[in-house]
Image (spheres, rainbow, N blue to C red):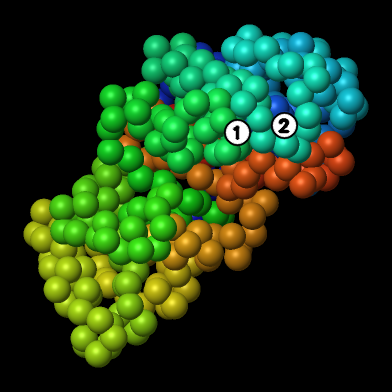
Amino acid sequence: MFSNPDFQTQQATSASTEHVKALALSMGDPAGIGPEVLLKALHRLGAPACSPSQAEQIDTEPKIAVRVFGDPEWLMQRANELGLGEVLQKASWIQWESACSVPRTLPQGVASAEGGACAVAAVLAAANAVIAGACRALVTAPLNKQAMHLAGFDYPGHTELLAELADRCPVRMMLEHQHLRTVLHSIHLSLRQALDALDRASLLETFSIADRALGRMLGRRPRLLLAALNPHAGEAGAFGREEIELLSPCISQAQAQGFSILGPYAADSVFAMAWDNPEVDAVIALYHDQGLIPIKLLGMDLGVNITLGLPFVRSSPDHGTAFDIVGRGLAREDSFLAAMRAAHRYSLA
């Protein structure tokens, strides 16, 4: 499905990349692995000894700049602890922006109000830089929902926080792997709440957001598949009537409006139909785990979370703060690198 060359690296075709704006990177929760994966990703992009096999890079030239929002002094201390400081200090293509102050006694691997406040301050500063036009896309390192709540920010996660910042615009989460994209109709809801949230208006809104956002990213109308809700897509009503009474009529209405969408297809088959299929651009999943399980099964190290519907490009790695491995040097930067590549590629589209 994504075998075209621009999936790996894409240079601007209409204008030189020498003049494009920087990517804005937020440091994430300082008690989690976000700072580590961010620093490792930047080091991998800038290390002169980086081998071709490692160089799944955006562009190591200074013309592709980044601005890192967080606590610069604390981040450089972490970089030195990881053995990355020498390269990062010399990287002229990195600009370190002060957005918060991390308490030097902040415990690692533990949710705290201080960590949550710093993470939110960093993402708000980075997002506002993009909204103001100073940066071209946002890449967010993981924050911790409990820490964010302890700091007084009552949002389920980045997606809802950024939607609020962008004047409450309707958004959807999309997960992307090298060979599969899935758009989530609902995000951080219980399964019962997700089922209750299924209605014609919201489904058509999901179709519209996916069609419009992916259309901008791909430069053409996307080809979508809809996952069914019930086993065997309801088996003609034997296992549920949602496919007959809700999903199929929604698809017919969307098709009448010009959308390229087919389904509903049984959820145990639709992702196999879409995987590495050049005729399919994304699967629309009806609830959180229905869409995330196939992406994570393909490999968490290369998954990317992209928010559709925002007035700017936002991506993040497909993992959380991983408090259990903080400080052990085990966090892998691959997903953060993939998120940077996605932000770079789609912000040039």
Which quarter shows the C terminus? Answer: top left
Residue under label 1: 147
Q: Disc number at residue 31?
A: 2
328 sits left or right of 249 in the view: right
Q: Residues within 10 Å of mark 1 (few under 14, many from 20)?
A: many
Residue nearest the observer in this picture, 70 or 343: 70
The image quadrant that residue 36 belongs to is top right
**Closer to the N terminus: mark 2 or mark 1?**
2
Q: Position of residue 118 (x, y in %)?
A: 61, 21
The image quadrant that residue 35 belongs to is top right
On screen, 199 above or below 71? below
C-beta proximity under 8 Å, tags 2 and 1: yes
State the CA–CA distance, disc 2 to disc 1. 10 Å
Q: Residue at x 32, y 72 (%)?
A: 229
- Tag 1: residue type? Ala
Q: Position of residue 117 (x, y in %)?
A: 58, 22
Q: Residue at x 25, y 68 (%)?
A: 262
Q: Residue at x 87, y 29 (%)?
A: 82
Residue nearest the observer in this picture, 221 or 252: 252
SS of the residue under disc 2: loop
SS of the residue under disc 1: helix
Q: Residue at x 17, y 77 (%)?
A: 244
